[in-house]
Amino acid sequence: MKRIQFLLALTVTLILAGFAQAKDIELLNVSYDPTREFYAEFNAAFARHWKTTHGDTVQIKQSHGGSGRQARSVIDGLAADIVTLALAGDIDAIHDNAKLIPKDWQKRLPLNSSPYTSTIVFLVRKGNPLKIKDWDDLVKPGVSIITPNPKTSGGARWNYLAAWEFARRKYGSDGAAKEFVQKVYRNVPVLDSGARGSTTTFVQRAIGDVFLSWENEAFLAVKEFGAGSFEIVVPSLSILAEPPVTVVDKVVKKKGTEAIARAYLEYLYSEEGQDLAGKHFYRPTSPAAAAKYGPQFVKVELFTIEQAFGGWARAQVEHFADGATFDQIYLKQ
Amino acid sequence: MSARSERSVIPGFNLSLGFTLTYLGLIVVIPLSAAFLKTAGMSWSAFVDAVASPRVLASYRLSFGASFLAALVNCVFGLVVAWVLVRYSFPGRKIVDALVDLPFALPTAVAGIALAAIYSKNGWVGQWVEPYGIKLAFSQIGVFIALTFIGLPFVVRTLQPVIEELEPELEEASYTLGASRWQTIRRVILPDLFPPLLTGFAMAFARALGEYGSVVFISGNMPMRTEITPLLIITKLEQYDYRGATAIAVVMLVVSFILLLFINLLQRWSRRHHRI
């Protein structure tokens, strides 16, 4: 009898001891396609940082996909503590459709909640056989362009708007820009739903001559497959892509992870976070990291979506909603 | 004793009917009616806008057209395959027989990637036809190829047991009575095979209509040209247009149901008219 009592007491003590130990915290970061490698390394760095400053073990899970699809998963109930998507419009949708975050979410962190920026460049095959130099070269007959579907991919929306703004500046009107973009898309043989799918199409299935790509994704392709296979071409004008981040308020309040989720995002702005962003070919925003990684990026004239299109909400309605310009360029063919 | 013999051999009719209805309700009817409920909140004009815009109409044409053609082609070649597998014995028959089931088992995305790899410009097959200006992958032909691939086992597997039941003696009798080969096929063999062919067609067709995974990899997904309806539904969902998506789904559901019902009726009719 005594023995059983002792064993019982022991078990209870062990269980209680288990509870008293440092907490194991789990966070889910729902992100878009080309951030895979960056966040894999950043998560490990943040976990180390949190362990040394707070003693708790934090495990960060990642989910990747087309930016729009990822936002929809969160709207449909995927319990993301953090979203780090390709464009503000997709995070706005989380507010509009599910009210999981406040309307002014973008004001909560510095720099429009975009700790790192990127842009759109061209990836071409070795030696650039078609001599692609700028956006004009894309509309030549016989050039095959790979880009994802702007309706589902965040990166593709940046591509589309960059092409549009280039033509508007060069030819002087929205009408001419639309015609130009239509010619560009006439040269697109496949529309994948996300940026990673398009990378696979271009890199692994060897389809297309030019790939309109996130700058970091282009660098990654060159790094992975060697400079012997691909070259990066930087056009004369491109768009400043600001992929924003935010905490999903309703989820972190329920899970009790608000403090750590905020700390996670703030850590993106720290020197270590900025350094990793630069290492993975995002353009860092901190002066130190920008100076360190600046030389790897070609200087290019960048415009912002606010300047050229009056922000995402307007660009979405004018270009990507049902019946807007993207639908029109296909209907008129 | 006599009261008992009137019953079915297997007891529990009420119980099993109850199970059937509950099961169908939970698995089929309730999820589908949710789609109808969701669209019920739309105004009529919004519904028409969603389901009859040019892009959606183009996708219906492709989805129904390619599914129909694929099922038709599968009927022809599926019949040949099933006939060969039942009537002839040759080395490797068991392996061929097992191969037929592969499209059932293969994850459709894998099938799509494999088909796209083979039929694209750089693929084993694609590189030989592309110089002649024929695009297989990333065209409507690609959609048709994928749908043919996934539909084949349905036709073969519905025909096989029926062909096994056919008695070769009947064909021999037909010969000895002076019928030509064509007459034997038309008057003796086909009447028995017509009902299962229709079933196989209906299943292959229905499966092709709903297919998504393999098609998106090989179609190229170009608006107005190679977008299938299931892809449009997903695209609408990704634009947070839940109602638009369910509206298209409802149209597909209704049209598919009518078509399947029609095929079933046709099958019943053919059974009555062709049986001796």
Image (cartoon, coloured by chain):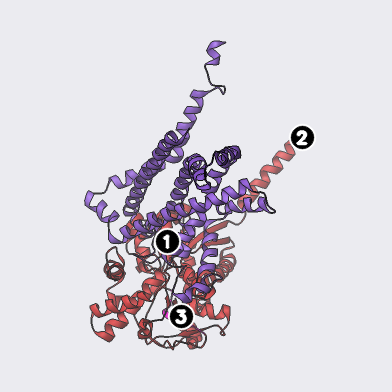
Chain colours: A red, B purple
Callout 2: few (<14), some (14-19), or many (20+) C-alpha neighbours within 10 Å?
few
Amino acid type shown at disc 1: Arg
The picture places residue B222, in percent across and down from the top left corner, at 38, 67
Q: CA distance from mark 3 to mark 2?
A: 80 Å
Residue linked to disc 3? A209
Amino acid type shown at disc 3: Asp
The quadrant in which residue A118 appears is: bottom left
Of A309 and A206, the residue lying toward us: A206
Callout 3: few (<14), some (14-19), or many (20+) C-alpha neighbours within 10 Å?
many
Residue linked to disc 1? A69
Callout 1: few (<14), some (14-19), or many (20+) C-alpha neighbours within 10 Å?
many
Q: Are marks 3 and 2 in contact (CB under 8 Å)?
A: no
Quadrant that contains the C terminus of chain A: bottom left
Q: Which residues are magenta?
A: A115-125
The quadrant in which residue A112 appears is: bottom left
Residue linked to disc 2? A2
- Chain of the residue under label 3: A
A213 in the magenta segment: no
Question: Can residue A232 be seen at all in this image of the molecule?
Answer: yes
Q: Main secondary structure of the magenta part?
A: strand
Q: Are marks 1 and 2 in contact (CB under 8 Å)?
A: no
Label 3 secondary element: loop
- Chain of the residue under label 2: A
Q: Is residue A141 above or below residue B66?
A: below
The picture places residue A165, in percent across and down from the top left corner, at 30, 80
Badge 1 or badge 2: first in the primary sequence: 2
Amino acid type shown at disc 2: Lys
